Image (cartoon, rainbow, N blue to C red):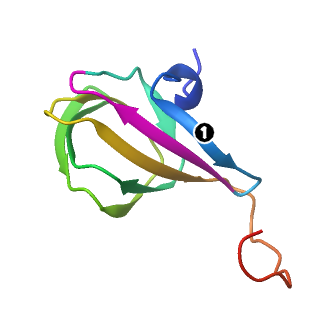
Amino acid sequence: MSLDPAVSNHDVYKVVFENERVRVLEYRDEPGHRTTPHEHPDSVMHTITSFRRRLIAHGEEREVDMPAGFTGWLPAQEHAGENIGNTPTHVLFVELKDVGAAEATEHLGPA
């Protein structure tokens, strides 16, 4: 079984951008939805909506309340989750790929 969330939980994780340095996932679910175990590399998370979740990893559980508009660092991890709140979850994850330092270019702005 794949631990890639875009494969194992393809109903809620969608790849919205990918290149050799990063992969951006959009996550959406409804109250009561549960994910199967999956993993993320080092990532930056940005919450679009506020939500409440239970995270399960290595036999331990933790509940989190996330406000809309939060941006933060997530170290690499494996977990499963459950929306235990009353609102849908909408989040973007920018997953970092281990490809070393980027070479400087002479381009400005979006590529």
Q: Is residue 70 magenta?
A: no
Residue 71 appears anywhere in the view = yes
Q: Residue at x 23, y 30 (%)?
A: 83
* Residue type at numbered disc 1: Val
Q: Secondary structure at mark 1?
A: strand
Question: Is 102 in front, or is 105?
Answer: 105
Within 10 Å of disc 1 (Cα), the crowding (few <14, some 14-19, many 20+) is some
Q: Residue at x 13, y 33 (%)?
A: 86
The residue that disc 1 covers is 15
Q: Residue at x 21, y 27 (%)?
A: 31
Magenta segment boundaries in residue numbering: 22-32
Quadrant assignment for the N terminus: top right
Farthest residue, direction top: 1
Q: Say whether residue 62 is left or right of residue 23.
A: left
Percent position of residue 99, x then y:
75, 58
Residue 78 appears anywhere in the view = no
Q: Say whether residue 21 is left or right of residue 40.
A: right
Question: Is 15 in front, or is 55?
Answer: 15
Quarter of the figure with residue 37: top left
